[in-house]
Image (cartoon, rainbow, N blue to C red):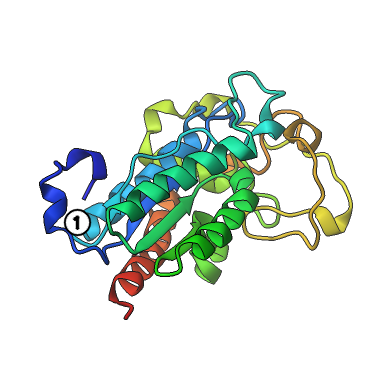
């Protein structure tokens, strides 16, 4: 079910245990080959695909299309919210959902810069609404070892605008992928304990702007992307997402 495609009368029929899904994403540069809407389009792809698999088992809210992207603002076109604004938007949206009686909230994140503040939100909302289950997932953490096996480039290949995001966009909106503009990430190395990507978490957090991390805005290797790989990534992520949604609805 798509929240804003329903009428007020439709809501009377919905089981209030049905998870309500909110995509939090970003509008920011994704190198020379991917559109600014990449994170939003990927998040919405997973939400819509889950809706198609279990149409009566999920309610999908309108996505938050701008996120915490201050570290991308050196690149033209990027938009950003402060942590306070991001938190206020999500908190007020969830407050509205809870007001209507729903007891399962699933936040699906598709932007690395949203991870920290989203975790704070889960803890704050969970404490504020003890009878509501608030769950957060970042999509690339759902695939497990099978997702790692799909990567052909090894460490740093699956970072920002790299192998995985480009593969998904070749599946979702191939007309927006500028394949003639592919560039491998121009990475600037730092301490070994601070290096990482989607599939290889660093041992410690070190703040660097995206321009400091990579001069061309790409962290990874888009030349290894393919639509077929995008299909496989999507299947793995959706399998994990569906499991979470079903578990939440069936929880006593």
Quadrant location of residue 251? bottom left
Q: Is residue 131 above or below residue 34?
A: below
Instruction: State the SS at label 1.
Output: loop
- Determine if residue 114 is in view: yes
Residue 146 located left or right of residue 182: left
The one of 39 and 103 positioned closer to us in this rendering? 103
Quadrant location of residue 216? top right
Q: Residue at x 62, y 49 (%)?
A: 117
The one of 8 and 156 positioned closer to us in this rendering? 8
Q: Which residue is mark 1?
A: 55
Residue 30 located left or right of residue 226: right
Percent position (x, y) of residue 238?
37, 60
**Residue at the extreme right of the image, as rendered:** 191
Residue 45 located left or right of residue 225: left
Percent position (x, y) of residue 144?
53, 69
Using a 10 Å C-alpha cutoff, classify the residue at mark 1 as few (fewer than 14 neighbours), some (14 to 19) or many (20 or more): some
Percent position (x, y) of residue 235?
37, 59
Q: Residue at x 53, y 25 (%)?
A: 180
Percent position (x, y) of residue 71?
71, 34
Q: Residue at x 27, y 53 (%)?
A: 100
The one of 138 and 235 positioned closer to us in this rendering? 138
**Residue at the extreme bottom of the image, as rendered:** 252
């Amino acid at each position: 079910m798509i929240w804003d495609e329903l009428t007020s009368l439709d809501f009377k029929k919905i089981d209030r245990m049905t998870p309500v899904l909110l995509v939090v994403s970003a509008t920011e540069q994704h190198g020379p080959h991917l559109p600014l809407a990449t994170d939003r389009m990927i998040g919405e792809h997973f939400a819509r695909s889950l809706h198609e698999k279990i149409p009566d088992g999920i309610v999908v809210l309108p996505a938050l299309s701008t996120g915490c992207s201050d570290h991308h603002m050196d690149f033209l076109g990027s938009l950003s919210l402060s942590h306070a604004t991001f938190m206020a938007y999500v908190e007020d949206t969830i407050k509205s959902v809870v007001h209507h009686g729903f007891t399962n909230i699933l936040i699906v994140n598709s932007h690395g810069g949203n991870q920290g503040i989203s975790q704070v939100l889960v803890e704050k909302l969970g404490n504020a609404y003890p009878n509501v289950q608030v769950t957060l997932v970042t999509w690339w953490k759902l695939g497990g070892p099978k997702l790692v096996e799909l990567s052909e480039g090894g460490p740093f290949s699956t970072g920002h605008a790299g192998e995985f995001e480009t593969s998904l966009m070749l599946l979702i909106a191939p007309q927006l992928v500028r394949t003639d503009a592919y560039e491998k990430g121009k990475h600037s190395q730092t301490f070994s304990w601070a290096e990482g990507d989607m599939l290889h978490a660093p041992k410690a957090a070190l703040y660097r702007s995206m321009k400091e991390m990579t001069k061309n805005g790409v962290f990874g290797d888009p030349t290894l992307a393919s639509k077929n790989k995008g299909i496989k990534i999507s299947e793995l992520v959706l399998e994990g997402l569906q499991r979470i949604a079903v578990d939440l609805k069936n929880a006593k």
